[in-house]
Amino acid sequence: MHSTIAPAAGGAYPCRSGNQVRPLIDGPESFGRIAEAVEAAQHSVWLTLAFHEAEFRFPGGRGSLFDLLGAAAERGVDVRGLFWREPDLESLVSDSQIFAGTETEQKMLRDRGWGGKIRWDVLPGFCHHQKSWLIDAGQPEERAFVGGINLDRGSLSPRGHALRGTPESGVADLYAEIHDLYLELRGPSTTDVFHNFVQRWNQASEKEVPGGCFPDPATADDLSFPSRLAEVQGDVAVQITRTVKSGVYTGSESAPDAAAFDIAAGEASVREQILSAVAGARRTIYIENQIFLSRTLLSALHDALQRDVQVIAVVPRIPMKELIEYRRRAPEVAAPIFEWLDRCGSHPGFTLVGLAREDVTGRQVDIYVHAKMMLVDDSWATIGSTNFMGRSFFQETEMNASFWCPDAVKQLRTELFEEHLEEDMGELNERRAFARFAEHARLNAVRFAAREPLQGLAHALETETYCT
């Protein structure tokens, strides 16, 4: 691996060579591949899950989460889900749903004879936010999916985000059309996804609490850590990075061919890797993130801009209401973050971007950016669950997969640019493509303000009024 971007040194998992990666853009493509992998599983399907909308259905008529997993369990596959439980969800994250394992929900599982196993995990005041799938752990067919897409109807918005509803249909809320990503992974780094699952599953906070396991603690039993690396599947270097709050888990059981790591002290390797990538950038940085409010990251991006690095950040035009309230409620804390955003915005190499699509009535409908990814110099990328803010870097439970692969990163960047601009970008080199994206977004900002039809989805935003 020859790169100016160093792997994170302060986490549980090293950068490993020999992997195969496949970025998956938007929900239908991601959930379609995940469902295919679940249907092909021969031994196990293990997932970590944060948010789950009861009405969600997998593409291709595959039914609900519990339909898909139940069918696998009926084939004798070991199905396990580690689900976040939050007793006061509405005050922490409004307008969201989780599968909290209430008496009613567990009765539903018993009544249908559902054969999977579940443990619930609580993180008081914060979120166990990882969204990972591990198929056939420890077997030659082992593969993982690491990303940030929630199981909700808005996340089934297809690539290009052709609107699926009209104002009359009732599908008109902020989260009706969502943009997001997953990464499909095969090779030695899947072993680290395996290790993470076992570490969290065996220490899930509710495993000895009544109602904290399904169907019962004896059946939803502990797991053994992986003893060897998954087989080589390609030539891509990948590092699994995490955020784990200190004091949540204990132990120093290492992953195969990795140093012992005391998880009791916590882990912040996602943040370390993100900052390393920004420091190593020489030409371009492309970001898509739901929450783009880290003072340290914005300061680092400002330094990159001073080095003539072009930066594009794609975010929700209308952030979640908790962020708007945060800026109003705690100005003394929020002000330094937004000052750094404004400093970046004053630089000609920086473009803040939202996505929107015109509906049949001519109304501009926002495409909600829920992605958590970054690309640097057409050579390095990260995809995962981590929002770019302090809580996600230090206190939530997160997972990202970073990979060093120029061919895959350039292809992903080209596909995303073509989705957002609705232009063929294949003939443009990296710097020209970034310049074209920024120019296109600024022209669309004028059209958006005049309520004229956009050309593509991307339109520039003003940093000084963001989150107001």
Image (cartoon, helix red, strand yellow):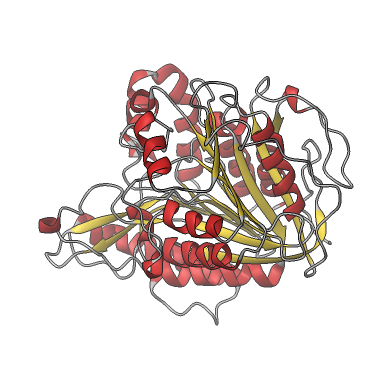
Task: Indicate the position of residue 166 as horizontal and vertical percent values.
Answer: 16, 61
Q: Residue at x 81, y 40 (%)?
A: 9
Task: Indicate the position of residue 3 as horizontal and vertical percent values.
Answer: 79, 58
Quarter of the image where the N terminus is located? bottom right
Is any part of residue 266 visible from this angle? yes
Is 289 or 71 nearer to us in this picture? 71
Q: Is residue 278 left or right of residue 457?
A: right
Give above or below for 48 relative to 72: above
Task: Indicate the position of residue 457 as horizontal and vertical percent values.
Answer: 34, 64
Is 142 or 463 nearer to us in this picture? 142
Is 2 or 306 nearer to us in this picture? 2
Task: Indicate the position of residue 112 as horizontal and vertical percent values.
Answer: 39, 48
Q: Residue at x 51, y 31 (%)?
A: 127
Give above or below for 68 relative to 272: below
Q: Residue at x 16, y 59 (%)?
A: 363
Q: Is residue 149 left or right of residue 43?
A: left
Q: Which quadrant holds residue 153?
A: bottom left
Q: Which quadrant holds residue 61?
A: bottom left
Quarter of the image where the C terminus is located? top left
Is 137 or 334 nearer to us in this picture? 137
